[in-house]
Image: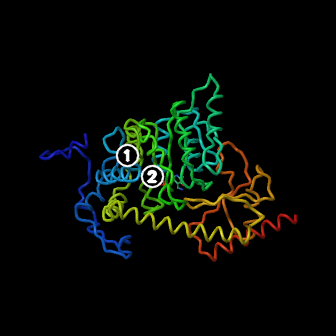
Amino acid sequence: MFPLENRPGLISLLAGKPNAETFPITSLQFTMRDPAAGEDVKMELTPDELQHGLQYTPTNGLPELREWVFGLQEFQHNRYKGEGWTVSVGAGSQDLIFKAASALLNPGDAVLVEAPAYAGTIAILGLVGCEHIEVETDTHGIQSSSLRSILENWPKSKSKPKVLYTVPYGCNPAGTTATLDRRLEVLKLSREHDFLIFEDDPYYNLYFGPPNRPPSYFALERSQSEVGRVVRFDSFSKILSSGIRVGFASGPESILQAMDQHSTVTNLQPSSLGQALALKVVKAWGYEGFASHTANVAAFYRAKRDVFEAAMQRHLAGLAEWATPEAGMFFWYVFKLLGGDDDSASLIRTKALEHGVLALPGTVFYPNGRTTAFVRASFSTLSPEQVDEALRRLREVILDERKT
Ligand code: PMP
């Protein structure tokens, strides 16, 4: 009944909202980088914006922020409001992926998961009690041949998977951006074998590869005039603030409504203040300004990637192998002295730690206990000097290990 409260002239005795006049925060000012002007500008929430930011909001998000997201999906993915899909805001995309999994999956359900996969989602699926079906990937993304073979050889006695989970841009951990061909094949298979695609895309705006980037699954399904298969997860975490905890899901209405019901009983809604702040910023920029900002962010990460790769060449050429990421913030590399499915964990946890350097052993990104010699290195926060020193230390680790 809550949306009815907005009806003009209606006097509502409905909501158990506290009276915001009693709240101690009476104004909110901040400065913001303006990508067009290249300088900081002073901002202040209007009394109305502040009131919305301090008060409960609808479960699926501040209406104005949801409108902005509809516009963004049109701007970036050619998806138009009113065509049978909707938007929900969550406390980061992690919150929404969890709610989507909880809404759609039952304990024992099989879920197709790219391997290696984002460990946060592996954990979600584990919590829901799903069986992880690993789908092989390579530097082009999900190996559609592997996916096809899994689906064509699916045991008759077992229910088919309802969902495939993938991170198509700058995959965490593998750094891969899926090619258009692979995306098209995966989408085709989703129709043939009737599963949904969870497109978890927090690195979409951190793309720094060649022009003619591949469209999202969300865009592709519409361009093929057959929608309703993709649930897309976006996040402000990598482009505005990760602490602000604002992400959004876009997809079929029935699915998002089920997710909203989950929010109603778990956290009621994501933070109003986080949403009000994010909205103030993106509204001030407009979509073109948002695009300039994200282009700046992507260029920043590209420079970081280049510094990291140059240091890899200096210190690890011949000792490790890697593919160059075109989006995101991760290098996924393998030490040559280890065999493909040796576990890198002991080397990292003992020798690397002794030498004062850490990275994430790749084994955590495989759900079913498979070990791997791969390691994930994040290049987002270190200075060039720190990168150089970290990789020099890793070189020592490998040379030491070779001696023993
Ligand atoms: N998906 C992926 C692939 C991620 O890398 C992350 C963050 N590490 C998330 C989801 C969660 O992001 P958020 O901060 O939006 O919850």
Q: Amino acid at mark 1?
A: Arg
Say left or right for 63 vs 98. Answer: left
Which quarter of the figure is the C terminus placed in?
A: bottom right
Sort mark 2 into few (<14), some (14-19) or many (20+) by Cα contacts within 10 Å.
Answer: many
Residue 227: in sight, yes or no? Answer: no
Q: Position of residue 347 (x, y in %)?
A: 76, 60
Say left or right for 309 vs 290. Answer: right
Q: Residue furthest right?
A: 404
Q: Nearer the viewer, residue 69 or 59?
A: 69
Looking at the image, do the residues carrying marks 1 and 2 touch, with CB atoms under 8 Å apart?
no
Along the polypeptide, which appears first: circle 1 or circle 2?
Answer: 1
Say left or right for 343 vs 384. Answer: right
Residue drawn at x 36%, y 71% as measured from the top left:
36
Colour setting: rainbow
Q: Of helix, strand and loop, which one carries label 1?
A: loop
State the residue position of label 1. Answer: 79
Mark 2 CB within 8 Å of ligand 1: no
Q: Of helix, strand and loop, which one carries label 2?
A: strand
Q: Mark 1 and mark 2: span between their CA atoms?
A: 14 Å
Q: Amino acid at mark 2?
A: Asp
Q: Residue furthest left?
A: 9
Q: Is residue 125 above or below residue 347?
A: above
Q: Nearer the viewer, residue 172 or 53?
A: 172
Sort mark 1 into few (<14), some (14-19) or many (20+) by Cα contacts within 10 Å.
Answer: many
Q: Position of residue 305 (x, y in %)?
A: 59, 66
Q: Position of residue 108 (x, y in %)?
A: 58, 32
> Which corner quadrant of the image does residue 301 belong to?
bottom right
State the residue position of label 2. Answer: 234
Residue 160: in sight, yes or no? Answer: yes
Looking at the rendered structure, which numbered label has been put on residue 293? none
